[in-house]
Image (cartoon, grey):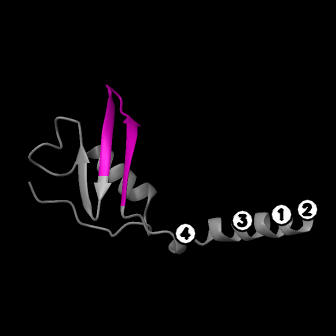
Amino acid sequence: MYSSLIGKIEKAQRYAQERERVNFSRFVVWFQGEHDRYRLGYDEGRWECSCGFFNGRQVCSHTMALERILQGMIPSRTAPAE
């Protein structure tokens, strides 16, 4: 029993190093900003954030930070021009 668990642990460690295996399609997270806590959502390439800056711009520092954290696990996009 323990040998099979050891094999699973080793496989998990290898998988964790191969980030390209993971592709997110949707999720919801809470992001602690400097001034408040924000609810962020991602659904098939579309972001949402409860911060005031995101409304009307469809991008903010919180979504950009998560794009960096999840680089390679979600499709990349360029920031919209102001």
The three-letter amino acid code for the residue at tag 2 is Tyr
Q: Which residue is mark 3?
A: 13
Secondary structure under badge 1? helix
Q: Please give left or right for residue 54 compared with residue 44 in the image.
A: left
Q: Which residue is mark 2?
A: 2
Q: Which residue is mark 4?
A: 19
Query: In which quadrant is the N terminus drawn?
Result: bottom right
Does 43 sit above or below residue 50? Answer: below
Callouts 4 and 3 close, C-beta under 8 Å = no
Q: Please give left or right for residue 52 compared with residue 15 in the image.
A: left
Q: Which residue is mark 1?
A: 5
Nearer to us of marks 4 and 1 is 1
Query: In which quadrant is the C terminus drawn?
Result: bottom left
Image position, residue 67 (x, y; %): 36, 57
Dividing the picture into quarters, in which one does residue 36 lie?
A: top left
Q: Earlier in the sequence, mark 1 or mark 3?
A: 1
Find the magenta span and give its range: 26-41
Secondary structure under badge 4? helix
Nearer to us of marks 1 and 3 is 1
Image position, residue 32 (x, y; %): 40, 33
